[in-house]
Amino acid sequence: PLSLPLSPSLSLVRQSSCQEVMAARPTTPYCVVSLPRATANARGMLERAKSRGVSLRPHVKTHKTIEGALLQCGGVPGPIVVSTLAEARAMAAAGFSDVLYAVPLPPSKIPAALELHQRIATFGVLVDHVDSARALWASGPDRPWHVWLKVDCGYHRAGVDPSTEAAVGLATAIANHPHTRLAGVYVHAGMSYHCSGPDAIGSVATSEAGVVANFADRLRAAGLTHSFAVAMGSTPTCSVLPDTLPGVTEIHPGNYFFYDAMQAHLGSCKQSDIAVCVVATVIGTYLDRNEFLIDAGWTALSVQGGEHGFGIINLPGWKIKRMTQETSVVGPDGSKAEPFPAVGTTLRIYPWHSCVVSALFSELHVEDENETLLPVTWATARGW
């Protein structure tokens, strides 16, 4: 068990606008957040950023909750990253006034983004193509957009090629146009999710930091003199950050708040750091084939991580073998297995990918260090 002072976090939760829940256990499957572990994870990343001399702009897409965002920011609203406009609207309503929507913005979403831009002090949008920039210029904002340029650091999902003159030209155009200002340059080393062990992740982190810092240097050499953020971050790379980050001004991880079985497998965290699980009930036992059935399928756990048992069950020697929509078949994993659980037994599944699981539930239950449910739930900002 974690030795952690809980009073600030418990106070934050109890003073929030969460819905009160029944004292009885919820109907399975349900999703549970360990408040001590999540608090420790949030505190650890804040301290890691501070020790490197950079700011933390946490991503909130993993949990999608106001309460989680507050914990990530140290108890008060601070700069955050979102992946959906629904998340942005929920956070804005809760008093977050510096929000970055970190998905390349298409013209079709500019009206909704403009409403947020007019509503809060700093609403950042992300672009990686001149057509998106032109759409922002044509939108007629009453004040300049806060625009971040997405830079490809080797993941090849999105972003401009930082080695090209076109990338420098787009950044310069954004900075010089009266309807936009260059708020920052942004990289995400998603390839770190294919690493094995802290050393490999650390190598990717060093490369990620170097790419964005070098690109920022190119922009300054091209004549951009105003201040802009130089941002990097994925949960694996930010969990094993280099001791120094020359040229980087902020980091933006998100999954670390919960972590998950995948992060433990990669080496980003320990299994004891995982702060979220899905509680399921054994609804059938089949001794003849050495399997049992639980009432959580891919609508509660997702289908990611099948080659790793879809996560970790708190019953040694057993793993999920296959799934359907509402149920999963559990069988031995090849090691010495605990005895068959009886029908009605509740089990915990620590998911392979916590970001997906949070999006599958409309509310998250919260427990203390004794695994006792608190009389609150955290509402998730689902949708787009």
Image (spheres, rainbow, N blue to C red):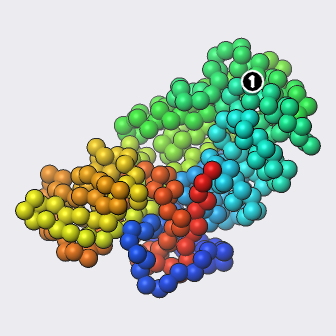
**Residue 371 quadrant:** bottom left
Q: Where is residue 193 in the image (x, y as percent from the top left)?
A: 44, 38
The correct choice, above or below, for 336 with respect to 284 in the image is: above
Q: For this rendering, which residue is in front, 151 or 355?
A: 355
Secondary-structure class at tag 1: helix
What residue sits 64% from the left and 39% below the top?
A: 103
Q: Nearer the viewer, residue 233 or 128?
A: 128
Whether residue 6 is situated above or below residue 71 in the rendered picture: below
Apparent side of residue 173 relative to residue 100 in the rendered image (left or right): right
Tell me if mark 1 has few (under 14), some (14-19) or many (20+) residues whose alpha carbon lies within 10 angstroms of its own: some
Which quadrant of the view contains residue 179?
A: top right
Q: At x 62% / y 74%, what residue is drawn?
A: 18
Give x and y (percent) for residue 42: 56, 58
Q: Can residue 4 be seen in this view?
A: no
Where is 313 relative to 356, above or below?
A: below
Kind of residue at disc 1: Val
Instruction: Provide the residue designation for mark 1.
Output: 130
Query: For the N terminus, which image quadrant?
Result: bottom left
Left or right: where does residue 198 sit relative to residue 285? right
Give coordinates of residue 160: x percent, y percent: 65, 24
Which residue is pictured at 61% across the width and 33% down the height? 187
Q: Which of 326 and 369 is in front in this view?
A: 326
Query: Which residue shows up at 66% across the image and 35% down it?
Result: 104
**How many numbered discs, if any?**
1
On the image, the x and y values in percent for residue 139 come to 85, 36
- Residue placed farthest to the left in the image? 288
Q: Can residue 197 be seen in this view?
A: yes
Q: Outermost residue, top direction?
A: 165
Left or right of 145 in this view: 52: left
